[in-house]
Amino acid sequence: MTLYTNMPLEVVLEGFNDDREDMQEIWTSGVKMQVIPIAPGMGKIVRLIECGLDDYLNPKFTPGTIIQYQ
């Protein structure tokens, strides 16, 4: 990969090796998604993994949305 930028390399790669938050894969409403747990039974959506095409347009599955699951 080639990256052309006038920014210092330290700024571009800042946080590249930082630990990422633990994520879980869950099924809810017929959609498999990856979430970051924020409380027991609650999480923030990171991305959709398995779903129908219409689910990508559903505002309740938007990344960053807080959902409840079991």
Image (tube, rainbow, N blue to C red):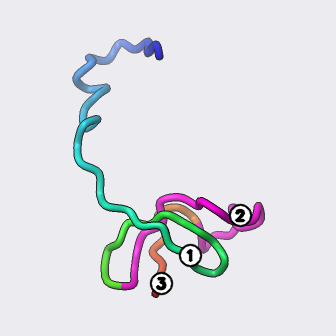
User: Please, what is the three-letter code of the amino acid marked with disc 3?
Assistant: Tyr
Residue drawn where x is 52% and y is 61% of the image: 63
Indicate which disc, 2 or 3, sits on the residue closer to the N terminus. 2
Q: Is residue 3 left or right of residue 50?
A: left
**Residue 50, position as x, y percentages in the image:** 65, 63
State the residue at coordinates (23%, 48%). 19
Mark 1: few/some/many CA within 10 Å (<14, 14-19, 20+): some
Q: Amino acid at mark 2?
A: Leu
Q: Earlier in the sequence, mark 1 or mark 3?
A: 1
Q: Which range is magenta?
A: 41-61
Dot 3: few (<14), some (14–19), or many (≥20) neighbours within 10 Å? Answer: few
> Is 40 drawn above or below residue 2 in the view shown?
below
Q: Disc 1 and disc 2: Cα gap in Å?
A: 18 Å
To which residue does mark 1 refer? 27
Residue at mark 3: 69
**Element assignment for label 1:** strand
